Image: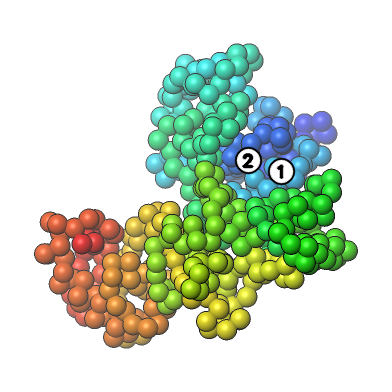
Amino acid sequence: MDIRVLIDNTGEIITIDIEEYLRGVVPSEMPAYFEEEALKAQAIAARTYAAYRAGRGGEYDVVSTTLNQVYDPENAHARTDAAIAATEGAYIQYGGRLIDAVFSATNGGRVRSAQERWGNHVPYLTAKDDPFCTLPLGNSHGVGLCQRGAQQMALSGYSAHDILKFYYEGVEITGKTPRELFCEELERQVGHGVYVWGGNGEDLLDMEDPERWIRHQEADTGGAERSIGFYRQCVVDGITPLRAFDCSGLVYYALKNAFPAQRDMTAEGFYGECEHIKRGELRAGDLVFRIDQRGVYHVGACVSDGVIEAKGRADGVVRAALDAWGESYWNGYGRLKQFSEEETMPTVLKVTSPMMSGAAVSAFQQGLLALGYDIGATGADGRWGNNSQAALDALIARQTESANQGKPSAAVTVAAAGASYSGTLYAD
């Protein structure tokens, strides 16, 4: 999406991609040292504010001053760039439409409504007490997102979505799912990670003496020297950013992008937090494990084209096919409970021919698997065959007896073999 910006001091009108535009807006409107979740909330609000005004006629959409949003590309900062990238495509909606995402620096402890400030009723811009903002109102209008309140909420452990839903009544945040955010963060670390025992994403290039830190982290001299050798080669190659991870630290760091309150844990801890699944059920965002007689000792994460892991001191963070290191390399599989709980699998599927394929078929197969139906060894491959049809027949037959005693799991509409079924799936 392009935004037309009137540059106030020159009178020039520029047309710029909205994501590039935000690079000059977010750090101009909110200090770059603010907490990550506050910066993400500001990025989503600023993106929505601009998109709401785009293409409404006239020569330009927004002005580069506080009349709309301050835009100064010279203020671009790595921390706000990261917040913009992490929320790319996310917007705030009310009733399925973009909102007018106004915001101000402070509100004096009380969010003002659009009615009292400007005389027009807006259902998502309502008045309420704000315990997170303790600064006086000053020259701010106090409507919508409060930037100082957002900072305090972030410091208290609230996510960007929590912040926005507090300041804009009854809204929904559209765009990327937590599973997508998790996978995207993993992708960003490929080729940018050094394996260090206990590493949780520490910025090695920001340390005064990273080699000394690595030696302190590692249990033995040999391991430390291998990590340092890899680190030195990355520096020579000009790789930036460059972070420290062990296998579970990489998963923890990426999960924080989706769930800011995520706590650190070992590979065995992550295994305990997962719903255990079969190899054929794996999808992007699921975890894979290495397990021996001693227990779970290594973890990686699936993405769309393989597995990403902090592999070892000679490799860093890599991406490879599931079987790249042999079929027995990964021998445990799990789906994080956070992701299982977020997906109710609403699906509309029309079976038109044997072996039909597509995303709707794959989604419905995943729903069948989640409810314990056998759809064959190939799993949710997106192709409708005899096993999928048999599972569908069993599901339809089961609904009457299960509806009064099971837990609602998903809403579906299915048409197959001249008959149709529409209703709720129930898990026993």
**Helix, strand or loop status at disc 1:** helix
Q: Image height check: is 32 above or below 330? A: above
Q: Image height check: is 81 above or below 187? A: above
- At a point 33% along the width and 82% down the height, the residue shown is 376
Q: Which mark is residue 246?
A: none
- At a point 88% along the width and 63% down the height, the residue shown is 236
Q: Looking at the image, which is closer to me, 298 or 215? A: 215
- Spot occupied by residue 401 in the image (x, y as percentages of width and height): 11, 64
Mark 2 surroundings within 10 Å by alpha-carbon count, few (fewer than 14), some (14 through 19), many (20 or more) = many
Q: Residue 36 carries which label?
A: 2
Q: Looking at the image, which is closer to me, 26 or 118? A: 26
Kindly indicate the quadrant of the structure image that contains residue 405: bottom left
Q: Which mark is residue 79?
A: 1
Horizontal side of 19 relative to 279 (left or right) equals right
Q: Say which label, 1 or 2, has the lower sequence index.
A: 2
- Spot occupied by residue 35 in the image (x, y as percentages of width and height): 64, 36
- The residue sitting at the right extreme is 236
Q: Image height check: is 414 above or below 127? A: below
- Is residue 156 visible to the viewer in this orientation of the structure? yes
**Helix, strand or loop status at disc 2:** helix
Mark 1 surroundings within 10 Å by alpha-carbon count, few (fewer than 14), some (14 through 19), many (20 or more) = some
User: Do the residues under discs 1 and 2 have CB atoms within 8 angstroms?
Assistant: yes
- Spot occupied by residue 362 in the image (x, y as percentages of width and height): 39, 73
Q: Looking at the image, which is closer to me, 178 or 76? A: 178
- Spot occupied by residue 364 in the image (x, y as percentages of width and height): 34, 69
- At a point 61% along the width and 56% down the height, the residue shown is 249
Marks 1/2: CA–CA distance: 8 Å
* Kind of residue at disc 1: Arg
Kindly indicate the quadrant of the structure image that contains residue 375: bottom left
